[in-house]
Amino acid sequence: MKDKIHPVYKEATIACVCGEVIQTRSTKPTIHVDICSKCHPFFTGKQKLIDSAGRVEKFTKRYAGKVTGKAKK
């Protein structure tokens, strides 16, 4: 490997707007983020599946009564 081409990899602090502070290592000393694993809806379980166009209901109505035949070998 070549000498003096790699960046300095040092201790870093990641700060979220919710107040969560995470210590890690990075090339930047501080990183500010808008959302983290503590406040993200997917990780907190507050995520809601929004189907504004009714696509799921349309799919289930269309394919609810159909029975598939045997698979060809």
Image (cartoon, helix red, strand yellow):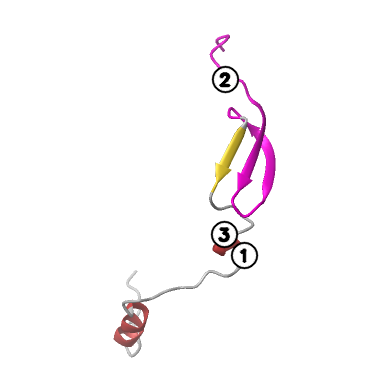
Which image quadrant is residue 61 in?
Answer: bottom left
Q: Where is mark 2, residue-wise?
A: 7
Label 2 sits on what residue type?
Pro
**Front-most of residues 2 and 39:** 39
Is residue 67 visible in this depiction of the protein? no
Whole-angstrom CA distance, mark 2 to mark 1, is 35 Å
The crowd level at tag 3 (other Cα within 10 Å; few <14, some 14-19, many 20+) is few
The answer to the question of whether label 3 and label 1 lie on touching residues, with beta carbons closer than 8 A, is yes
- Marking on residue 40: 3
The answer to the question of whether label 2 and label 1 lie on touching residues, with beta carbons closer than 8 A, is no
In magenta, the rendered stretch is: 1-28
Is residue 26 visible in this depiction of the protein? yes
Q: Secondary structure at mark 1?
A: helix
Q: Where is mark 1, residue-wise?
A: 44
Screen quadrant of the C terminus:
bottom left
Residue at the spot 62% in from the left edge and 55% down from the top edge: 18
- Residue 10 vertical placement versus 24 (above, below): above
Residue at the spot 68% in from the left edge and 46% down from the top edge: 21
**Does 67 appear in magenta?**
no
**Does 21 appear in magenta?**
yes
**Front-most of residues 55 and 24:** 24
The crowd level at tag 2 (other Cα within 10 Å; few <14, some 14-19, many 20+) is few
- Residue 72 vertical placement versus 26 (above, below): below
The answer to the question of whether label 3 and label 2 lie on touching residues, with beta carbons closer than 8 A, is no
Image coordinates of residue 36 in percent, x first then y, are 59, 52
**Front-most of residues 64 and 67:** 64
Which residue ends up furthest to the top in the rendered image?
Answer: 3
Label 1 sits on what residue type?
Thr
Residue at the spot 31% in from the left edge and 77% down from the top edge: 53
Whole-angstrom CA distance, mark 3 to mark 2, is 31 Å
Which circle's residue, 3 or 2, is located before the other in the chain? 2
Q: Secondary structure at mark 2?
A: loop
